[in-house]
Image (tube, grey):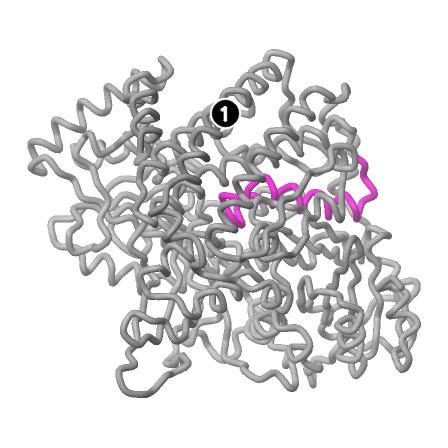
Amino acid sequence: MLRILHQIFRTGIVTEPLPAETGAAIQEIGAKLEDVIRRRFRRSLTIRAVDAGSCNGCELEIHAINNPIYNCERFGIHFTASPRFADMLLVTGPVSRNMEIALRRTYNATPNPKLVVAVGDCGCNGGIFGEGYASLGGVDKIIPVNIKIQGCPPTPVAILQGILKAIL
Amino acid sequence: MTLRETIISAPGIDASPDENQCPSNVPAYIVSREQFRDAARMMKTADARLVAEWATDESHYSSLPLPSGEREGVRGRGFGIYACYARDNEYLIVKTYTPIEDPTFPSITKKFAPAHRFERQMNSLMGVIPTGHPDLRPWIRHEDWPEDAYPLRKSFDASKPMQRVKGEYNFIKAEGEGVYEIPVGPVHAGIIEPGHFRFQAVGEDILNLEERLGYVHKGIEKRFESLSWTEGVKLAGRVSGDSTVAHSLCYCRALEAMTGCNPPERVLWLRALMLERERIANHLGDIGAIANDAAFAFLLYQFSRLREMLLRINLKLFGHRFMMDRIIPGGVIIDINSDGKNEILAEMNWLLKEFERLVVIYDENPSLEDRVRDTGILKPETAKELCVVGFTARASGRNLDCRIQNPFPPYDKIIPKVPVLNSGDVHARAWVRIEETRESIRIIREILNNLPDGQIAEPDLKSQASCPQPHRAGFAVVEGWRGEIVYWLQSDAKGEINRCMVRDPSSVNWLALEQAIHGNIVPDFPLCNKSFNQSYSGHDL
């Protein structure tokens, strides 16, 4: 137990001391995010992440916005296990044929008003997988999309920026 | 006796070598369709494991002249059926043909357990029929696909979407008083890939777990066939995003084997540097995530902080957080200078110190220990039976690592010391990865201290590496962080991609989760699943 406490105090809060260039970006986006989330979402934006066929690269970066350095919870953003509680769907793609029905069901289970953010080049337009018998292309081919976040995969900062754009 | 001698001298098996198979230390032997199972029996007796089994559509080859070394009588081509076996440092491919009019071949499932899924997959995607297979329910192919849709056949038009038809998947059922079912997925609670799990349970005890995957099937193997060799490496880097370095490296090595291209030493060492960095990043993330699934979030945040720092150095020195698209046929696209070298060495010193502090906390926490020990046990004999690979195998007493068994420079000089544990539980899988992280830090230091000078990509090499001869086949294995990744590439009459077979370690290791879960309780499933952390995308392709 002492070791744990020692490690906690030794580590301190890592969310603040960021390398200058990304640090500034996060502060700026974060302040805007916090303000919007406070006004429009009563201090909490709840996200349901849906992998509709991704290679898992985008998932790793969505995980990263939860790490103590990007720490998205400080802005009131958190991830939920059920679409029924969600304000926003964060969808990675390309949408595979075998996930199409599950994605539609998740979308329908999310209460209105809802926002959909497509994450990654594949979520935007199918990426390298294109459109064919098994890959149906970008998320907007299946459900309405509010915002697209480019990148393969997009960096955690880009994901935070995209979320902000969607709720502004 | 080597596997090669075994197959040549086997009574009743008439095996002829396929000279188009590269590299020369991974030979392929052609046998008649009837002898395919006999060959499997010989391999089983010789204590080999099944690495992969796959099919090719070679029907359009028939009008071509015989490739040298192939005997009359084996012709008639149609579908090629391949099985790859391995023992110690030897890999061997056994190949046969089955005609289009009667695309059957003898199933080898009764000899090798992992063939169960390989053959279901071949049946589902290529439409070849393994006779004697006990369970030909579709795999990866979902029940609403049209009946005659076999995407890997050349006659299939992959550019059009498929109709949905009515169909039902028959899950295994359990009956009895108090038995109930829990369906989970495909959309899971966390930020993870989709798949479906069906539990039969009594109270909290799991009677059976059945996996049903294929949700992220994007048609990757078919997609390869429409790409050029140089575009192919990009797709390989996106088979499983967490293993992008290992997959693109394996693709390049298979292609370089076909073209006889030997990249300079410096390239090989830089590739190994990236491979080990990828291993560390994933191990750090997953050790934390395992602790988190046992409700010890502290370690998740601590380890994910270390992981983030590593990814930032990747971005700074290699230009991408996961080092995607850094490896190309014949070379790498990025070099490091002495500043970069010193930066990584300093990073490794810092990382090791931080890491060891956290390992002590992991090791000394009794409530964590209570959850991870004796949970999700994969017994060594089961691991052997299922032919599992990677850290999953090494946590269950199997000393397998293709950095040692099939090394390329620098692993011929810097030999990894591989941890092997026997308990096969969640703790063993986590601990093997802790030891591997230490070892990768050592390897990275050695690579940097002995990095050979030279060019990283000569234009000649690049073009040589992407132009194989027609009708060649290339094979390569690379030890990614999950385990042995296998690529088998085949060129057509024009020298372009005819087939690209990808076998992610998850393709075999998914079987192990179903076995390891027996005797556990439902609430421990996420913990068990996380300790394996298989790729869905790499499996579903």
- Give the left or right position of residue B404, taking residue B428 as reference: right
Q: Nearer the viewer, residue B404 or B354?
A: B354
B253 shown above or below B149: above
User: Residue drawn at (73%, 44%), measured in percent from left and top?
Assistant: B404
- Give the left or right position of residue B323, taking residue A54 as reference: right
As for residue B257 lying within the magenta part, the answer is yes
Task: Quadrant for the N terminus of chain B, please.
Answer: bottom right
- Give the left or right position of residue B262, taking residue B419 as reference: right
B14 shown above or below A167: below
B203 shown above or below A126: below
| Quarter holding residue B304 | top left
User: Residue drawn at (37%, 53%), measured in percent from left and top?
Assistant: B371
User: Residue drawn at (49%, 47%), measured in percent from left and top?
Assistant: B430
Residue placed under numbered mark 1 in the picture: B351
How dense is the environment of label 1, judged by Cα within 10 Å: few (below 14), some, or many (20 and up)? some
As for residue B232 lying within the magenta part, the answer is no
Residue A115 coordinates in the image, percent (x, y):
19, 45
- Helix, strand or loop at label 1? It is helix
How many circles with numbers are drawn on the protein?
1
- Give the left or right position of residue B175, taking residue B19 as reference: left
Q: Nearer the viewer, residue B366 or B183?
A: B366
Q: Nearer the viewer, residue B526 or A137?
A: B526
Residue A69 coordinates in the image, percent (x, y):
32, 26
Residue bounds of the magenta highlight: B237-262
| Quarter holding residue A4 | top left
User: Residue drawn at (74%, 21%), measured in percent from left and top?
Assistant: B450
A80 shown above or below A9: below
Marked residue chain, label 1: B
For the stretch drawn in magenta, what is the main secondary structure?
Answer: helix
Q: Nearer the viewer, residue B54 or A123?
A: B54
Residue B63 coordinates in the image, percent (x, y):
81, 70
* Amino acid type at image mark 1: Leu
